[in-house]
Amino acid sequence: MLVIVENHPLPRTAAFFDLDKTVIAKSSTLAFSKSFYQGGLINRRAVLRTAYAQFVYLLGGADHDQMERMREYLSAMCRGWNVQQVREIVAETLHDLIDPLIYDEAASLIEEHHAAGRDVVIVSTSGAEVVEPIGALLGADHVVATRMVVADGCYTGEVEYYAYADTKAVAVAELAASQGYDLERSYAYSDSATDVPMLSSVGHPYAVNPDRALRREAVSRGWPVLVFNRPVRLRQRVPAMPSRPVLAATAAAGAVLTAGLVWYMSRRRRPVLS
């Protein structure tokens, strides 16, 4: 009797990364405050205020109320900004400002997930104009970020889509449906308790440099806790180990080269017979 065995490929999987304090060591939006000041978008007072906000954020993270105040402040601050000018400033200063802030551990994880065949998705509350170039720098396959309303090429100060808390989890579910990801076999990483909905939506959640609330949640749910503390420029990182096929090809090439060298040396040492 002929038995037909059908090969059903496994569903696709993904790794979802929060950005600030998970992949990079600071707030991505606030990191550009000096550049926005030099570009004439904000005044010195705003620079000082964002520097203080960065300090508070790094010290203890931001709870829901703090995030709401920051959203309102940033939305009001960017009203009237020219979108193209913002994109140009981010592009010009991206490598100088963001590259040194990328956690070596996060970059290695991204490489490992790609090597395992998983898509990498950056899911951030920061604005798309900032997150998308950072995602490209990291080699992300998709980016989910906050989008502002734009009219006549300028921000109106209103938010079109806010990538925060439950809306992140909804975005992850929608992306999974469109891309065919199996969320039960997928991964997610974040530092903030506001991302518990996103972390809960995958089968492999990880708390990274967690704030106090997320640490408590991770302990109660048995989620692994990771500590990232080595920011390093991408160009200065030691390249990841090549995959097994690459290693095999390299070993084979080395064996051929060695054999050839041995043969050549033996020919040189062989006495000439007259």
Image (cartoon, rainbow, N blue to C red):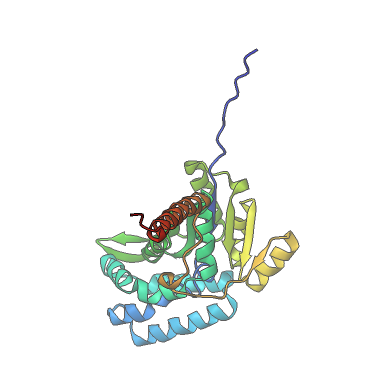
- Name the quadrant containing residue 57: bottom right
Q: Quadrant of the N terminus?
A: top right
Q: Is residue 227 left or right of residue 160?
A: right
Residue in the picture at 35% in, 71% down? 94
Q: Position of residue 63 (x, y in %)?
A: 59, 71
Q: How many marks?
A: 0
Does residue 81 show up? Answer: no
Which residue occupies the extreme left position in the image? Answer: 152
Establish if 2 lies above or below 27.
above
Residue in the picture at 47% in, 53% down? 255
Q: Quadrant of the C terminus?
A: bottom left
Establish if 6 lies above or below 148.
above
Q: Is residue 33 left or right of residue 177?
A: left
Q: Position of residue 173 (x, y in %)?
A: 54, 47
Does residue 65 show up? Answer: yes
Q: Position of residue 84 (x, y in %)?
A: 26, 65
Q: Is residue 264 left or right of residue 203?
A: left
Q: Position of residue 49 (x, y in %)?
A: 44, 84
Q: Nearer the viewer, residue 77 or 12?
A: 12
Q: Nearer the viewer, residue 26 or 230?
A: 230
- Name the quadrant containing residue 129: bottom left
Which residue occupies the extreme front position in the image? Answer: 274
Q: Nearer the viewer, residue 175 or 78?
A: 175
Residue in the picture at 48% in, 84% down? 52
Which residue occupies the extreme right position in the image? Answer: 220
Residue in the picture at 57% in, 32% down? 8
Q: Nearer the viewer, residue 129 or 209?
A: 209
